[in-house]
């Protein structure tokens, strides 16, 4: 029998349909992989095998009765930012302690209602603040990828899986689940997908409900999937997206059949290449990757147009005002009174201060302080209001671009995966990881990362597609063309399964 | 923009986060660095620009003014660090 964990989600769906294997067999294969491989990767922070088996048995029954739903019997991982009813949810922060929500996130509920099976909760940067998964209270996630040294031999350097959805990207790349939920505030789906050879889409703001997802920066946060293929991504997003009365920013619009868009091709599609993304010091291999993407789309019948997004360089500094400001407001709720950690002090304020000092990690404290500063009396106009005005200009750049192009193509990240500690000492160096992705959140647009090649170190690189609001379909069909041309990038050696 | 130690302490107090003397020193440098870097936004002329309020144009949704939830005090207090008879137990607030 073939290794069931190596299947794509679409292949697993077909196998279940043909009754080549049962949902329970499939689920057990993943449970075994997690038991064997997770200790080396630390992708799952909580494994829920009994829960998964119970769901799998119910799925097998439905399949037997001919009542299979779109994701029936397909095992996935759930980022620990998504609240799970009665199952520990921590956002990978000490401050949530052993929090067990008495409710399920809307996106999670949509997935379970579509028949998906939850294998467990996935590691992430604390409160999704980070680009390397190094800020998690549960420790680093190790990427399943290993890089070549200068002598061309594979090293054992521990590489980051990207962040904040580092557990999601590592688990999918390492075949510990078929697909995973993730969230993206400044690049947290697309950057980890790019660094692990997986596909990640951040849909348009409002496409997925934010209800029941631990909030970081509410005007930027959006849920999406990380998957092995473009088709799997279409399957997952279709199930995750919905209109939700419980989230006022959720949009009441029909969710298209994204899988149907995959075969439409890009003939006649106008692809924009923003000249501002050719940043100083861009490496030759990233430049080549981008040129390859252009050639593939051209060969498939698309036309290529240089465009200008003049305010690109201001997106990252504006983001680092808006995101910390919203984070400082959102995280004010963690006061040690109603749930999570409490560290007693001399009086109420002392208790608050002790609790928040002990409960939040260094990067989260840093961002809360920045956010508090930029929102404090006398500074609000100079920082927050200014950043929101710049945001209007960033969005306007894209609005104008859509007059002449249908989709924008850029690299996802400025460089391949790095090793632990290489960037964690310098917050600004880490923030630059999001330089190509953050504009998309600032403008609320859909963005997708597709694996497109390998670096000179033998590690994956991704291309990013940016679309018009609610036009995820164009991203899917363009991404399919790139995937068809570039091929897929599985991890060459499953070292984490060797104990 | 230079953030001095007094400012770090004032912000930390506002944010209700205790910082040690050593941390305060490190934060002076880090916060100054980040705030200096974001000041490049001053290069952008925004005198005639409205601040963004939402990324997707949308009419604010209304819902029926009815009770949709409640009577779950046990669930609400289930995760509390301290609770008694479905009430949160907190440090003394009023002297």
Image (cartoon, coloured by chain):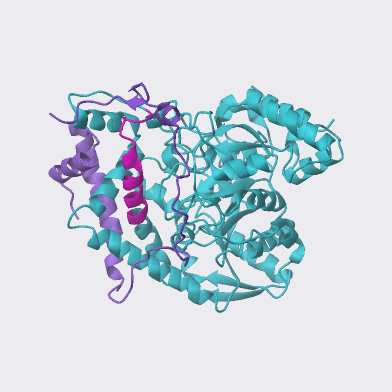
Magenta highlight on residue A68: no
The x and y percentages for residue A485 are 73, 59
| Chain identifier, purple in the render | B
Q: Is residue B40 left or right of residue A76?
A: left
The x and y percentages for residue A79 are 54, 38
Magenta highlight on residue A334: yes
Indicate the quadrant containing the C terminus of chain A: top left, top right, bottom left or bottom right.
Answer: top right
Tell me which segment is drawn in magenta.
Answer: A321-340
Q: Is residue A167 left or right of residue A4?
A: left
Q: Looking at the picture, tell me which residue is in the foreground, A450 or B87.
A: B87
Find the residue positioned furthest to the front: B66
What secondary structure do most residues of the magenta stretch adopt?
helix
Total marks drawn? 0
Q: Is residue A27 left or right of residue A140?
A: right
Indicate the quadrant containing the N terminus of chain A: top left, top right, bottom left or bottom right.
Answer: top right
Regarding residue B36, the answer to whether it shows in the image is: yes
Give the answer, above or below, for where A118 lies relative to A286: above
The x and y percentages for residue B23 are 23, 35
Q: In the image, what residue occupies the spot 64% across and 67% down? A: A294
The quadrant in which residue A336 appears is top left
Q: In the image, what residue occupies the spot 68% across and 53% down? A: A234
Q: Looking at the picture, tell me which residue is in the foreground, A459 or A260.
A: A260
The x and y percentages for residue A85 are 54, 32
Q: Is residue B51 left or right of residue A443?
A: left
Q: Looking at the picture, tell me which residue is in the foreground, A199 or A378.
A: A378
Give the answer, above or below, for where A40 lies relative to A266: above
Regarding residue A146, the answer to whether it shows in the image is: no
Q: In the image, what residue occupies the spot 75% across and 66% down? A: A264
Q: Looking at the picture, tell me which residue is in the foreground, A151 or A247.
A: A247
| Chain identifier, cyan in the render | A
């Amino acid at each position: 029998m073939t290794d069931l964990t190596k299947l794509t989600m679409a292949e697993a769906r077909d196998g279940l349909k043909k009754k080549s294997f049962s949902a329970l067999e499939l689920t057990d294969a993943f449970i075994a992989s997690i038991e064997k491989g997770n200790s080396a990767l630390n992708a799952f922070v909580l494994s829920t095998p009994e829960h998964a088996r119970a769901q799998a048995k119910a799925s097998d029954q439905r399949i037997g009765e001919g009542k299979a739903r779109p994701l029936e019997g397909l095992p996935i991982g759930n980022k620990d930012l998504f609240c799970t009813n009665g199952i520990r949810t921590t956002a990978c922060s000490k401050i949530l302690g052993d929090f067990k929500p008495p409710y399920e996130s809307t996106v999670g509920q949509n997935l379970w209602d579509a028949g998906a099976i939850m294998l467990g909760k996935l590691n992430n940067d604390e409160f999704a603040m980070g680009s390397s998964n190094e800020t998690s209270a549960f420790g680093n996630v190790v990427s399943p990828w290993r890089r070549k040294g200068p002598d061309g031999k594979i090293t054992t350097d521990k590489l980051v899986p990207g962040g904040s959805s580092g557990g999601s990207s590592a688990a999918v790349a390492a075949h510990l689940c078929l697909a995973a939920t993730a969230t993206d505030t400044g690049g947290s789906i697309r950057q980890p997908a790019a660094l692990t050879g997986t596909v990640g889409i951040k849909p348009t703001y409002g496409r997925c409900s934010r209800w029941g997802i631990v909030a970081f920066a509410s005007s930027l946060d959006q849920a999406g999937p990380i998957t092995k293929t473009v088709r799997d991504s279409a399957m997952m997003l279709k199930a995750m997206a919905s209109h939700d009365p419980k989230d006022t920013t959720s949009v009441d619009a029909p969710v298209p059949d994204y899988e149907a868009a995959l075969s439409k091709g890009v003939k006649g599609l106008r692809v924009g290449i923003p000249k501002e993304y050719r940043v100083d010091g861009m490496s030759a291999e990233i430049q080549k990757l981008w040129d390859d993407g252009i050639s593939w789309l051209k060969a498939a019948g698309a036309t290529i147009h240089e465009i200008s997004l003049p305010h690109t360089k201001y997106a990252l500094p504006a983001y680092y005002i808006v995101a910390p400001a919203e984070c400082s407001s959102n995280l004010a709720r963690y006061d040690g009174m109603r749930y999570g950690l409490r560290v007693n002090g001399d009086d109420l304020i002392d208790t608050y201060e002790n609790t928040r000092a002990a409960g939040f990690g260094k990067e989260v404290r840093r961002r809360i302080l920045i956010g508090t500063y930029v929102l404090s009396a006398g500074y609000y106009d100079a920082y927050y209001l200014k950043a929101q005005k710049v945001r209007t200009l960033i969005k306007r750049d894209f609005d104008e671009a859509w007059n002449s192009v249908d989709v924008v193509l850029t690299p996802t990240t400025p460089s391949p995966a790095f090793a632990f500690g290489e960037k964690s000492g310098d917050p600004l160096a880490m923030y630059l990881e999001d330089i190509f992705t953050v504009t998309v959140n600032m403008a609320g647009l859909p963005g997708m990362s597709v694996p497109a090649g390998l670096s000179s170190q033998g590690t994956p690189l991704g291309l990013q597609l940016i679309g018009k609001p609610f036009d995820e379909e164009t991203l899917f069909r363009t991404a399919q063309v790139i995937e068809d041309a570039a091929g897929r990038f599985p991890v060459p050696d499953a070292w984490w399964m060797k104990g | 923009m230079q953030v001095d130690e007094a400012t770090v302490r004032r912000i930390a107090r506002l944010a209700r986060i205790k910082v040690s003397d050593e941390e305060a020193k490190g934060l002076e440098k880090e916060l100054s660095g980040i705030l200096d870097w974001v000041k490049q936004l001053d290069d952008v002329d925004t005198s005639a620009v409205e601040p963004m309020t939402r990324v997707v144009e949308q009419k604010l949704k209304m819902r029926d003014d009815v009770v949709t939830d409640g009577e779950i005090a046990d669930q609400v207090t289930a995760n509390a660090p301290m609770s008694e008879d479905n009430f949160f137990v907190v440090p003394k607030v009023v002297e």
